[in-house]
Amino acid sequence: MELLKQRILRDGIVKEGNILKVDSFLNHQMDIELLQAIGQEFRRLFPDPAINKILTIEASGIGIAAIAAQYFPGSKVVFAKKTQSKNLDGTLYTAPVTSFTRGTTFDVQVSTKFLGPDDHVLVLDDFLAKGQALQGLMKIVAQSGAKLAGCGIVIEKGFQEGGRALREAGVNLHSLAVIDSIDGGRITFRDED
Ligand code: 5GP
């Protein structure tokens, strides 16, 4: 997605530890016009009319999923929670996830009320690095008995192993920008879908 790549080149900041900071437009301050274009692109890549749930993970995925859902009429957004809360009652689907940015492992949780065998789920997230977050969300979809329609990622760091492993496993995965390298602070992209 050319618009996204240009924005990453203009405003993305490469940090130590293979981290790309995009907080001026994606995951702290959010550029809603860009998010709308991202949502439309996800619709183009995932035309399946059966999609009725968009599953993501708090916090950065929520804005992306909420805007994208406008292009999936009738769909609901469900976000997996990372922390225990008194508001989270009843039975839960849970899966462990190790955070790429923090290095800690935690359980992500979704109430069984909001996903079930009749659902067709598109999983969305901001970044794909080692694939932990997506694997956790896919485990939750599997526990619920819902059908996984696909996984959409805004920025995939193609030099980390997550995307390759998921594609080899046959997951319908599309990333809007795939970064080949951020060596020396210089960002280069791979051709994407
Ligand atoms: P994974 O689970 O695929 O290793 O990492 C994906 C998760 O880690 C995403 O949910 C994202 O929040 C975070 N993440 C991974 N790499 C980056 C990065 O380079 N920049 C930012 N801002 N977040 C990242």
Image: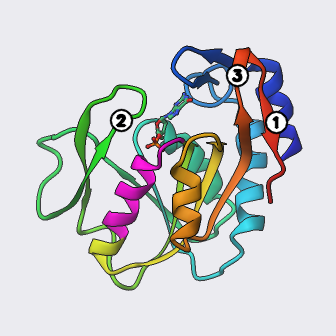
Q: Is residue 176 visible?
A: yes
- Verify whether residue 162 appears in magenta: no
x and y, in percent, of residue 79 in the image: 39, 51
Q: Is 98 rendered above or below residue 91?
A: above
Q: Secondary structure at mark 2?
A: loop
Examine the image and state in which quarter residue 187 appears.
top right
Residue, disc 1: 5
Residues drawn in magenta: 129-141
Q: Amino acid at mark 2?
A: Ser
Task: Return the residue nearer the eye: 170 or 77.
Answer: 170
Q: Is residue 4 visible?
A: no
Q: Is mark 3 within 8 Å of ligand 1?
A: no
Mark 2 or 3, nearer chain start: 2
Residue drawn at x 36%, y 69% is 141
Q: Residue at x 35, y 25 (%)?
A: 102
Q: Which residue is mark 3?
A: 183
Rendered position, 187 above or below 173? above
Front-most of residues 170 and 39: 170
State the separation of the CA atoms marked 2 and 3: 22 Å
Image quadrant where residue 106 sits? top left
Measured from the top left, where is residue 115 in percent x and y? 33, 71
> Can you tell which quarter of the image residue 117 is in?
bottom left
Q: Which residue is mark 2?
A: 99
The residue under the point 51% across, 71% down is 169
Which residue sits at x=53%, y=41%?
129
Mark 2 or 1, nearer chain start: 1
Q: Secondary structure at mark 1?
A: helix
User: Is the distance from the Cβ of mark 2 to the nearest ligand 1 atom less than 8 Å?
Assistant: yes
Q: Is residue 173 left or right of residue 108?
A: right
